[in-house]
Image (tube, rainbow, N blue to C red):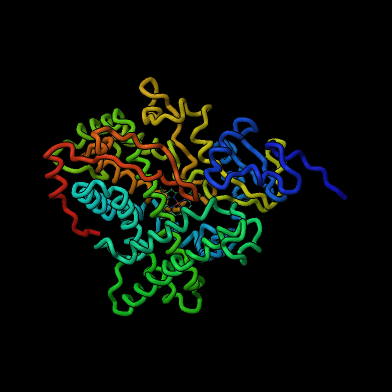
Amino acid sequence: KSIRHPPLPPGPPADPIIGHLRLIPPDNQETLFYKWGKIYGDVMHLDLLGRSVIVLNSVKAAVDLLDKRSANYSDRPRFVLFDMMGWESGMTFLPYGRRFQRHRRMLQHYLTPNKCVGYQPIQSREARVLLQNLLEDSESRDAFIRRFSTAIIMRLAYGHQITSDDDPYVKIAEDTGYALSNGGPPGSTPVDFFPFLRKFPAWFPGAYYAGFARNNKFAIDRLHNYPFEEVSAQMVRGKAKPSFLASQLEARIREGNDAQNTIADIKGAAGVMYCAAADTTWSTLSMFFLAMVLNPEHQARAQKEIDMVVGSGRLPEFEDRLSLPYVECLLQETLRWNAAVPLGVPHRSLEDDVYEGMFIPKGSLVIANTRGMTLDERVYSDPAMFNPARFLPKPEGNAEPHPSGPFGFGRRICPGRHLADASLWIAMVSVLATMDITKAVDADGKEVTPEVAFSSGITSHPRPYRCAIRPRSDTARVLIEHSDTSDTY
Ligand code: HEM
């Protein structure tokens, strides 16, 4: 007998059979979802070849479903393309279940707020290295912030310290970053809908991404195997530095036959930690520099605050954080202004559900539209504008809430968020304390205003842009040159 369900959430008119497929652009889907959200509401339904996609456009809807009903909304869709690339043991793509919970436990234990305090010396050191690098060659900003983001996680994941630009680990980070950010939106490329396309050559219409996955698999294989072999060899020689990988391999030896995590699990967990951290942190820092070039008044205000609290005789330290409320707002505004992961990572529902009178079928792909949430005019005044003061209490600011979407929701919320937050803070505050970020000047002496445009993929990066970065004073220059970059971790 047929069961009558409440209606599906609203959505745009669909074509027969293929549903909304033709309407969904391959790139920057968040922009379209944001526009549609204004027409169809906070919970939207799309039909992609008979598969239900639910787009959540408000924090409330995301919290109500992904947080409060997390038992039902913590699965992931099948990421055919990412599996093809070799990510099948990566936690981000694991279906909800025992294996996922084991992976989650491994990472969460390593990344608790308390443990992250212990990692601060690594972050402070890397921030100083970043300043020295920027002082030497500010044109290579992009490479240096990538190196900052990569160095921290590499140290934690594998105990490896980057010493040169042709370090094989740096190459691995670049190659996997490329594969992740150019592989199209997660779970929604043609291969994800038509798994048979993976067998076709790349020139076959719709099979482009399958070819891309095949061509980039080497990078993910290397990510999993190279550090594992290095760290295993160091362990044999008794020379392994403390790291996530070493601690998991030691636990496996200790647990002997009772060990639950396989080598593939451990390689996958370390690999995903590395990639999820490096690319997102880098992208957010790139947003920060972009925001600073375009908003000199906010830069100046943060610098003034730092000068008052820290002075010019030393670099900022984590202990200063609570005394720097405007820098805090600036960090939050960077996360909000253009979230680095604009559509999060899709969740999937396990059972039929009803929300506010709307039917959400079992197996729906559920997308938290972070971009839509951070640009929500009901929550944020003039949302496209970069304005850190919006978070300050009234009357100074507008008492608007910190963004809650950029790290995702529910049982899938980013396990690296405490680490990321500290990395971003120390990098931003160190740069603001000592450097001025301004528009670059072209060959004709004209200022170049960078375009606010982004790449499309799980993480969205600002398109390459130039800016000028100079020490704020001779004192700042000397401070940077003489800062201690010895390894104290
Ligand atoms: C600014 C930096 C970062 C941003 C914006 C970010 C954002 C996100 C988002 C949006 C998700 C998806 C959450 C969901 O499905 O609801 C996620 C998942 C994840 N993140 Fe992060 N992240 C950042 C840094 C990090 C770092 C530093 C690590 C590791 C040390 C990390 C590890 C992970 C992992 C393993 C997942 C998958 C979780 C799962 O599937 O259960 N991330 N992150």
Taking the image as shown, residue 96 lies to the left or right of residue 221, namely right
**Between residues 489 and 167, which one lies in front from this camera angle?**
167
Regarding residue 95, the answer to whether it shows in the image is no
Regarding residue 216, the answer to whether it shows in the image is yes
| x 46%, y 29%: residue | 383
Residue lying furthest right? 1
| x 75%, y 48%: residue | 17
Taking the image as shown, residue 218 lies to the left or right of residue 154, namely right
Residue lying furthest front? 444
Across and down, in percent, residue 323 comes to 27, 35
| x 32%, y 61%: residue | 155
Across and down, in percent, residue 80 comes to 59, 61
Q: Quadrant of residue 308?
A: top left
Across and down, in percent, residue 6 comes to 77, 39
Q: How many marks?
A: 0
Q: In the rendered view of the protein, which quadrant contains the C terminus? A: bottom left
**Between residues 453 and 413, which one lies in front from this camera angle?**
453
> In the rendered view, would you say 387 is above or below 98?
above
Across and down, in percent, residue 99 comes to 55, 65
